[in-house]
Image (cartoon, coloured by chain):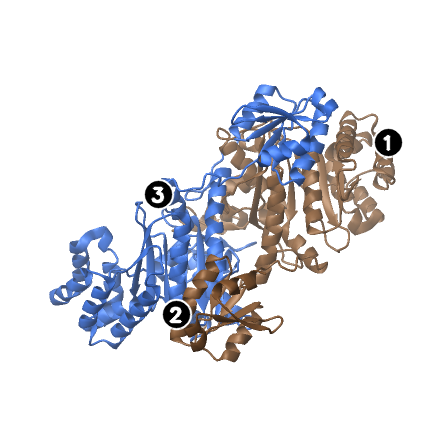
Chain colours: A brown, B blue
Amino acid sequence: MAQKPSIPKGTRDFGPLEMARRNYIFDTIRSVFSLYGYRQIETPSMENLSTLMGKYGEEGDKLLFKILNSGDFTRSVSTQVYEEATAPQLAARFCEKGLRYDLTVPFARYVVQHRDELQLPFKRYQIQPVWRADRPQRGRYREFYQCDADIVGSDSLLNEVELLLIADEVFRRFGIRVAIKLNNRKILSGIAEVIGAAERIVDITVAIDKLDKIGLEGVNAELAAAGLSAEQVESLQPIICLSGTNAEKLADIRKVLAGSETGMLGCQEVETVLNALEGETANTIELDLTLARGLNYYTGCIVEVKALDAEMGSISGGGRYDNLTGIFGMPGLSGVGISFGADRIYDVLEQLVLYPADTETGVQLLFINFGEAEAAHCLKLARQTRAAGIATEVYPDTAKMKKQMSYANARQIPFVALVGENEMRDGVVTLKNMTTGEQQTLGIEEAIAAIRA
Amino acid sequence: MAQKPSIPKGTRDFGPLEMARRNYIFDTIRSVFSLYGYRQIETPSMENLSTLMGKYGEEGDKLLFKILNSGDFTRSVSTQVYEEATAPQLAARFCEKGLRYDLTVPFARYVVQHRDELQLPFKRYQIQPVWRADRPQRGRYREFYQCDADIVGSDSLLNEVELLLIADEVFRRFGIRVAIKLNNRKILSGIAEVIGAAERIVDITVAIDKLDKIGLEGVNAELAAAGLSAEQVESLQPIICLSGTNAEKLADIRKVLAGSETGMLGCQEVETVLNALEGETANTIELDLTLARGLNYYTGCIVEVKALDAEMGSISGGGRYDNLTGIFGMPGLSGVGISFGADRIYDVLEQLVLYPADTETGVQLLFINFGEAEAAHCLKLARQTRAAGIATEVYPDTAKMKKQMSYANARQIPFVALVGENEMRDGVVTLKNMTTGEQQTLGIEEAIAAIRA
């Protein structure tokens, strides 16, 4: 019996219209990256599991797609080992490779592996799919694209400034109004330090990060559950609830952090970045001390972008990581990057009806097929229209006129050329404008001019 | 200890120059596909193994990369089953998904799955990586790109004609001189029929296909080994060694095939296609009866393209398949397609030094960083040059002049802007042309004009 075809859950097919829109997104991001001097690289879909494991936390390890070794993959695993080992242990024996989980770890691996060929500072962008064995749900897929720009080999804050300009410019081009939220991991560390809970920094950032989702009471409950005393939780309140202009927030937080060198450095970094961007962006940049971002490798500025007019999680984010290449044997190389979530941007553009009308520049001209001799003649005319840059089709079959016209309509082809016996004899085409219904009999050069107009 | 980073064998990293060249290849192919009315789709990297298995022959099944099920993948496999089952049987229990092996089977699956949304005939193109667990060797990778155009829902030979025009145009744009070889599976079937070995058609095509590699004697030995009698092998000789013009070859083969309806139909199809293309192509199209192509789903015209001036296997190929969607429950839908091998085309372009000089349009302007105040000023100037479409960098660190200039040289940036105290005061930039060494002091608008010139 024939199989009923389907695709794995959490994956998607993209049809022509979706592809045109996705390409619009990728092209827009790509051209801004290029304008700022970032150059494209690509890395393999598969990485050695030794490259990927342990880089995304325990949860991340579970979400890696692992690829079964080819051939007799069971060779080195005896029945006894099979009996006794856990699934993750067996997976490690059966699989050497996994699908990439993000673009940052492969980039760090790339930099270390190609260190001798690279000119530092190295600015790269990368637009490729990543895979995560997450539970699929609305807006969360198992295969999705990331669009990343990173620079390594420079710890100048100018890089942060430029990456924020890139974010601003990308969303300006899309026409999406956004809030760009900025924070600094050093400020968060400083806070943990001054309330006497430096070793709780991870728990604190994780809890504060949830303010949007679970509210202030929820955050406080989580902080308490993480082992903070009532006094410590209390002393965090002014920070969590900080308000006012960026300058006011900075002034307030500096009072709290006066005793922490790290914290004060974080404030200084944020201030430098904000000052450089003053008046330079279309969107507002907001200091948000509750922004934490999950990934533990961040060490300095962190940023997240949200759409103002659509319900959607963050559509872009990034930050400074001081030692990502260290895990691959190349310490002391600071990096900073920003990532755009193409799939979420897709949904926002659709929700806000922001796609340009001509996103899919499809076929402009269809030659109707009246028979073998006519079709052969049309093929030569199509050669001329194509040479003039006009995307052209010759209907392949000698089908009924009505069928061919409804094909043209369904494909939204704006011009149809009718070339029958008479037109062949007279060396002309009857050109029909499908929008106005108007018909003209023209030489092929005139027809080309009419289509271009 | 730090890991020494590497990537799985048979996979590759692509640096900025390689990416620029690859994009040149993809963009060229893409624009020809679009010109002929083909529209882009993408399918997931992972397909259900039930979609992939059994479509590429026994050898193909072995070359599929399989993805380990998430979570406790061993659950349904007892120790006893593990003990007794073969590796392929266990793989089928441990894995539900695999990486796509080509673009044709996923396309057939796509057409059947989305049949209600599609306007037939449906013309699509697809440019995506495929994965094969082949033994890696020169020119053969485990991850590589295919660029396919296919049309389903029309059995008109006009489609074959247009796909050959596409192949001709693509290689004309690349500047690669090619031989386009044409054959028809029906002719091969007719030959097998008239020598009384219809059931040996697969063996015969496989053997004849190797003529280039193993020579006439080798082919004859293989035919004999496949069970053909000396007489049958003898009667194949005029066909294998056929020479002359396409018309002469057709006339000769028609004499041999007079008794085979299928064979004569194949001749008719080839003749129609050749006549339609007469004088229309930049490259020669050659009827080659030894062309067989491995894949069993072809049923009509088959085509293969080879570079004339480079040692390389086929760089493009395709053909007509009459029932590929049948395996997914949608019989009676004929398709025909062509595929370009981007990786081999890459090597040919490199070998023949055919990349356009400006393939990588990199950064055009670098602002030297003289200090914090100067950099902040340059950032504003960079805003103007970028708004004018000039890809611009501001060197992020206040490094020694020599280091910054050698960065500009290594990156091949054609213009450097020096903006120190004096230039800031006077509202100008000192623009250095890195090719000529010439320096000019200009207003920013003049500098933009100079860079554009």
Element marked by disc 2: helix
Name the chain under label 3. B
- Residue drawn at the location 24% of the way across and 71% of the way down: B190
**Could you confirm whether marks 1 and 2 are on the same chain?**
yes
Q: Amino acid at mark 1?
A: Ala
Q: Position of residue B179 (x, y in %)?
A: 31, 54
For marks 2 and 3, give the CA distance. Answer: 43 Å
Q: Percent position (x, y) of residue B404?
A: 59, 24
Q: Nearer the viewer, mark 2 or mark 3?
A: 2
State the mark number for residue B94: none
The one of A220 and B187 positioned closer to us in this rendering: B187
**Disc 3 to disc 1, C-alpha distance:** 62 Å
Q: Is residue B247 left or right of residue A312?
A: left
Residue, x 36% and y 64% (percent of image)?
A: B319
Q: Is residue B278 left or right of residue A375?
A: left
Mark 2 highlights which residue? A376
Q: CA distance from mark 1 to mark 2?
A: 78 Å
Examine the image and state in which quarter residue B226 appears. Answer: bottom left
Residue B138's tag is: 3
Residue at the spot of label 1: A251
